[in-house]
Image: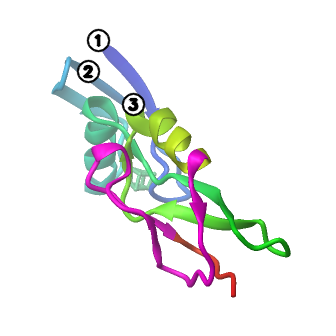
Amino acid sequence: MKKEIICTICPMGCHITVEGENDTVTSITGNTCKRGEQYASTEFAHPVRILTSTIKTDCEKHPLVAVRSEKPVPKEKMMECMDEIRKCRAATPIHVYDVLIENVCGTGINIVATGSVE
Ligand code: SF4
């Protein structure tokens, strides 16, 4: 299998071609540096993303607070994690980096606030 990937690590945006089967990478071409090679390898075998969203609060004046995952979440778990985030309602006060959902969907990753609500 061949996959074309645009590296998003830096503004160069190199077009990288990765070849392999399932989780095994056999060739990576088009990258300009080692970081791109690592990025492309991960994107091919096990793509992950930082999840950003909002969570409802119990405050009438500020009904939503911005959140993100502490670490990148496996791409295939994104929708499941969003469902859990949608169901959550956080109690105020909320401060930046407060953990609002622990171990979201069993990923071992926490959802933290990136804003605050007093
Ligand atoms: S491969 Fe290297 S130079 Fe190219 S976009 Fe990725 S990080 Fe930047």
Upstream in the sequence, badge 1 or badge 3? 1
Q: Is mark 1 within 8 Å of ligand 1?
A: no
At label 3, the amino acid type is: Glu
At label 2, the amino acid type is: Glu
Mark 1 — residue? 1
As drawn, 69 above or below 58: above
Q: Nearer the viewer, residue 14 or 69?
A: 69
Label 3 SS: helix
As drawn, 53 above or below 45: below
Viewport quadrant of the C terminus: bottom right
- Which residue lies at the image location 18% right of the left edge and 25% below the top edge? 23
Instruction: Check disc 3: other Cα within 10 Å, few if <14, some if 14-19, many if 20+.
Output: few
Farthest-out residue, right? 61
Left or right of 96 on screen, residue 3: left
Q: Position of residue 27 (x, y in %)?
A: 20, 27
- Residues marked 1 and 3 touching at CB (< 8 Å): no
Mark 3 — residue? 76
- Which residue lies at the image location 58% right of the left edge and 74% below the top edge? 114
As drawn, 76 above or below 63: above
Left or right of 113 on screen, residue 103: left
Q: Position of residue 93 (x, y in %)?
A: 61, 84
Magenta part of the chain: 87-112
- Residues marked 1 and 2 touching at CB (< 8 Å): yes
